[in-house]
Image: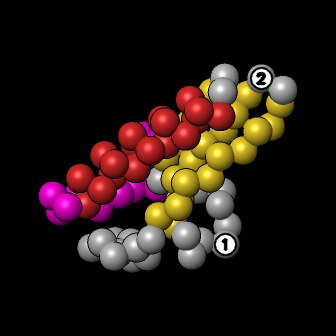
Amino acid sequence: MRSGVSPHMKLKVRVVHYRHDCWYADIDDADDRQPDDPYWYADGCHTQAEAIALACSHLAALDQAVAAGTLPSRISETIAA
């Protein structure tokens, strides 16, 4: 088991409006004070509803994966060297 990852962790969705036409969403550990390495993110959504829907569907997929015994990986852990 990787350090810092627990199947009982609390994940949060964050949605940010950063330009007049762009929304950003990510999923991270609720206790992580440094949100610079989330488990998932989407950049460039055109509406808040799109960002929320995308994040919720990915959060549901993460929940199913954890229920099946697969622990989530942070973005930095999934990037090929």
| Image location of residue 21, percent across then percent down | 77, 23
Q: Residue at x 59, y 71 (%)?
A: 32
For residue 65, side relative to residue 54 (left or right): left
Mark closest to the chain's N terminus, 2 or 1? 2
Residue 21 circle label: 2
Whether tag 2 and tag 1 are in contact, CB under 8 A, the answer is no
**Alpha-carbon distance for marks 2 and 1?**
27 Å
- Residue 35 falls in image quadrant: bottom right
The residue at the far front in this view is 49
For residue 25, side relative to residue 79 (left or right): right
Q: Residue at x 40, y 73 (%)?
A: 9
For residue 10, side relative to residue 51 (left or right): left
- For label 1, the residue is 33
Residue 68 circle label: none
Q: Residue at x 47, y 53 (%)?
A: 39
- Residue 81 visible in the snapshot: no
Q: Most prominent secondary structure in the magenta stretch?
A: loop
